[in-house]
Image (cartoon, grey):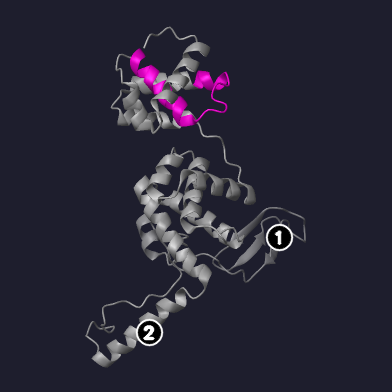
């Protein structure tokens, strides 16, 4: 029951008496409400460590697990509550229970699909070095794809790869289609096609990839200093403000900016070295370099 003012005097200064479970008006003394249930815990904690130890909320929901982590497991120890070893007859019964428990937990085709997909998602995410929050977001998006029936007729691997690519773009994590394609074993064109389909069906508002996100990775791989990174990001921001990256691949533009910045700061790297790190061709870097040099009026000879 939510009470905003006293029904007797109209006063709004209401106070909770938690010991008696009453709501009292401080102006006229009327007990506005009584027998209020306390929704808080029945224990007290005097610091954060005590609070964590005494909390009994259970484990959080995990989208990376097929059953979201809400399941009872029968352990493999074959011991009773006192730690004594159980008889061989009981062990055989527990073995059968484990087997049927496992079968029952992935009974339908969708549950089997989810079990396979989530293990593949975890594998790709591990290779890409993605944190748990990104894996959870990707798993949630895959579940939405299943609910909407977007999986039917498509390879599990291609949908998983497309979902990871979409989440990486949404969270501003620089992972290219080439990287995801190489790890997943799915063609780049197929991942792109599936990504566009999912994006349209789920009405995703995925932002354009910012090429500045790739600069730290490329610079680190090429062992370039912080000055080079700053210069490359400065060049890219000027290019973005002039609309020079529209219709260009972000990795190619970022690689060209790093190439130019390395020469400007006296830490020159060859086009081949930059191309290998960025996963683009030397021709792409040359083309983007010429465009940036011309449009930004750079006085530099490479």
> Which of pointers 2 and 1 lies earlier in the amino acid sequence?
1
Q: Nearer the viewer, mark 2 or mark 1?
A: 2
Label 1 sits on residue: 3
Query: What label sits on residue 16 in the rendered view?
Result: none
Of the 4 image quadrants, the one containing the N terminus is bottom right
Q: In the rendered view, would you say 74 is above or below 60?
A: below
Magenta-colored stretch includes residue 250: yes
Label 2 sits on residue: 97
- Look at 62% across and 60% down and name the residue there: 148
Q: In the rendered view, would you say 296 is above or below 36?
A: above
Choose between 244 and 33: the one closer to the eye: 244
**Highlighted magenta segment, given as a residue range:** 237-264
Q: Can residue 174 be seen in this snapshot?
A: yes
Of the 4 image quadrants, the one containing the C terminus is top left
Q: Can residue 68 be seen in this snapshot?
A: no
Q: Position of residue 155 (x, y in %)?
A: 50, 57
Choose between 231 and 107: the one closer to the eye: 107
Q: Quadrant of residue 69?
A: bottom left
- Look at 59% across and 68% down and name the residue there: 21
Residue that sits furthest to the top in the current view: 299
Choose between 253 and 53: the one closer to the eye: 253
């Amino acid at each position: 029951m939510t009470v905003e003012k006293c029904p007797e005097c109209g006063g709004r200064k209401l106070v909770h008496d938690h010991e008696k479970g009453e709501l009292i008006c401080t102006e006229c003394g009327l007990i506005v409400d009584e027998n209020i249930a306390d929704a808080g815990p029945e224990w007290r904690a005097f610091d954060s460590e005590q609070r964590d130890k005494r909390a009994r909320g259970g484990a959080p929901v995990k989208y990376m697990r097929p059953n979201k982590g809400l399941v009872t497991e029968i352990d493999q120890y074959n011991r009773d509550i006192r730690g004594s070893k159980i008889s061989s007859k009981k062990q055989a019964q527990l073995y059968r229970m484990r087997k049927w428990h496992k079968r029952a937990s992935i009974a339908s085709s969708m549950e089997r699909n989810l079990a396979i997909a989530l293990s593949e998602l975890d594998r790709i995410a591990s290779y890409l070095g993605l944190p748990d929050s990104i894996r959870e977001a990707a798993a949630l998006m895959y579940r939405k794809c299943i609910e909407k029936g977007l999986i039917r007729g498509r390879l599990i691997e291609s949908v998983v790869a497309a979902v990871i690519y979409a989440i990486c773009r949404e969270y501003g994590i620089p992972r290219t289609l080439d990287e995801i394609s190489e790890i997943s074993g799915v063609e780049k064109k197929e991942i792109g096609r599936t990504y566009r389909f999912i994006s349209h069906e789920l009405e995703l508002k995925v932002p354009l990839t910012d090429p500045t996100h790739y600069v730290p990775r490329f610079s680190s791989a090429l062992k370039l200093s912080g000055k080079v990174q700053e210069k490359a990001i400065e060049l890219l921001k000027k290019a973005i403000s002039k609309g020079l990256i529209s219709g260009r691949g972000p990795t190619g533009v970022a690689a060209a900016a790093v190439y130019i910045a390395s020469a400007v700061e006296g830490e020159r790297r060859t086009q081949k070295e930059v191309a290998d790190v960025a996963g683009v061709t030397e021709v792409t870097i040359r083309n983007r370099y010429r465009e940036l040099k011309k449009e930004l009026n750079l006085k530099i000879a490479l």
